[in-house]
Amino acid sequence: YAHFLLEQIIITLRSSPGEQGWCEIHRTVAFAVAAVPFPGMAPGRRVLEADRSRMPLHTGIDGALRRGDEERGRGFWRTRYWGQPPLQAPAGAELWVWFQPTVTDVDKAWKELSNILSGIFCASLNFIDSTNTVIPTASFKPLGLANGTDHHLLRYAVLPREVVCTENLTPWKKLLPCGSKAGLAVLLKAERLFHSSYHSQAVHIRPICRDASCLAVSWELRQTLTVVFDFFSSGQGKKDWSLFKMFSRTLTDSCPLASQSKVYVDISPKNKEKELLEVSPPPTSVHEAVVQGDKKTYAVYDLLSPSLFNTSRSLNVQLKWKRPQDTEMPIPTLHAQRYVGGYGLQTGEICTLIYNTHPYRAFPVILLETVPWYLRLYVHTLTIITKGKENKPSYIHYQPAQDRRRPHLLEMLIQLPANSVTKITIQFERALLKWTEYPPDPNHGFYVGSSVLSALVPSVTAMKDMDVEQSPLFTSLFPSSDGSSYFVRLYTEPLLVNLPTPDFSMPYNVICLTCTVVAVCYGSFYNLLTRTFHVEEPSRGGLAKRLANVIRKFRGVPPL
């Protein structure tokens, strides 16, 4: 058997006075052993698939999967302050899977897979059922070799209320070949990672080519982790940072199983002036790449290089600002926000704002909306306004919800003009649930999952073919179609909607009053039916009474 492993980390900092810096951590892990046929693969290809005893993630139904992604996030990515998200994840937990055409019962396999992943990652994925599962027709097309057009093999679900905790991080780290004992994983200290403004972790599985001719295909297991630290407030107004300041640890060695183990630090200048950053110790090399349409410069630290740990036993990358930075964060080309309008507890309105800040390029975007069944959408109220005019979607797919069975599904292909803001509104009516369907804290509200935007955004800097060959990590994390555009999947804010809530104290009062009345009436009635009465004859008294009557007789007093 043969295997290979890529373990890489990207550390990127973008901050300005009064703003937060963000740090993203990515791990690309791939195993390939044994030659076995790959289901649905074109003739002439062979697949190198991990042996079940050595594959880190074993679901029990691996042969039924074509592509799988599981993501969990805590917090929301603040695009206005942190820029374009590298790999954004929705708030809560998200799972979407492409199944093989050989799967006869997709719904059964989907339920089994969600239960298995729930046990593996200690998450509440077992709450995924038909009420929060949809079948998108245009979104979530698989990247890589598993290109499919039969959308009936796709399942997508999101749990917006799921909270990421330490118990989710531990099994995620155990998937790494060296765990948290060696390599870059030693930095993953739970008390530091969760003391942050934003945290997301994900696991992606897909088939990839092993060579240029794509005659050998293997499974790729990719783990990503994105964390945002607030250095400005935690550092008494200083924007300087280091690995020890972020993670309370430093790097001492690399994972023995890793064929690549590198640290990338973004040192891209914000303007044409002299660089404002100073990185120490000196990097092993400097790498330039096109990431999301912009040219970036990275300081690279190769942990496998013998000269890196010769001077010191540990690596503590430090970044200092030479002088205060007064440049503003560049506005992303595509970003969106969503909120709930209206008043009262009967009707409301969902408003989505999509921004295209490109000065002269227009491009389409696919919008995916999943709304729970207890918010009854009025599709005839759907309006799309751009620059004061109606914007008709090129493609629209709507699947109405069924009470307590499935949610609403709305997909639209919308053309975004250059330098425009598109407002999408749709009205809804709140349903009245049964009193047993309310959660323990009904007054907190009900969560609505984030909207999903998928688009090919025009690139400012074209990517060359040489960049694809020299930087496979960046092309894997940030795919580009033809060099002139790059693919982006964005998530809006989750919504918190209040529903008509009954007075849950009234049942308690009725139960207490009923129990009291029943206890008093039934107790008294039962006491009267079961009690027996006896007539007692008056007794003559004892010796003391007789002596008293004798004394009273001599005194002339009536006896007792």
Image (tube, rainbow, N blue to C red):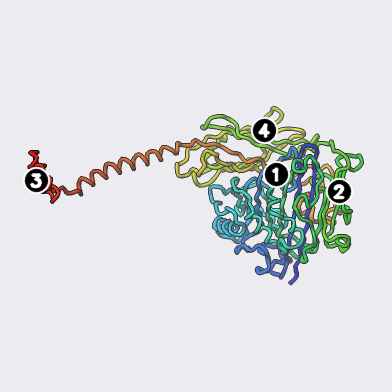
Q: Nearer the viewer, residue 382 or 277?
A: 277
Whether 354 is drawn above or below 296: the answer is above
Q: Amino acid at mark 2?
A: Thr
Q: Which residue is mark 3?
A: 550
Q: Which residue is mark 1?
A: 197
Q: Amino acid at mark 4?
A: Lys
Q: Nearer the viewer, residue 448 or 412?
A: 448
Residue drawn at 86 percent across, 52 percent down: 299
- Which numbered disc, 1 or 2, marks the residue that appears first in the sequence? 1
Q: Tell me how far mark 1 sits from mark 3, CA to CA.
A: 99 Å
Q: Tell me how far mark 4 sits from mark 2, CA to CA.
A: 36 Å
Whether the residues at callouts 1 and 2 have beta carbons within 8 Å, the answer is no
Q: Amino acid at mark 1?
A: Ser
Element class at badge 4: strand
Q: Tell me how far mark 1 sits from mark 2, CA to CA.
A: 25 Å
Q: Nearer the viewer, residue 544 or 87?
A: 544
Of tags 1 and 3, the one toward the viewer is: 3
Question: What number is the disc on residue 297?
Answer: 2
- Which numbered disc, 3 or 4, marks the residue that appears first in the sequence? 4
Q: Tell me how far mark 3 sits from mark 4, CA to CA.
A: 112 Å
Of tags 4 and 1, the one toward the viewer is: 1
Of tags 3 and 4, the one toward the viewer is: 3
Of tags 4 and 2, the one toward the viewer is: 2
Element class at badge 2: strand
Residue 238, x across and y down, in percent: 80, 41
Question: What number is the disc on residue 358?
Answer: none
Question: What number is the disc on residue 423?
Answer: 4
Q: Tell me how far mark 4 sits from mark 1, CA to CA.
A: 28 Å
Whether the residues at callouts 1 and 3 have beta carbons within 8 Å, the answer is no
User: Which residue is the extreme one toward the top?
Assistant: 388
Q: Residues within 10 Å of mark 1 (few under 14, many from 20)?
A: some
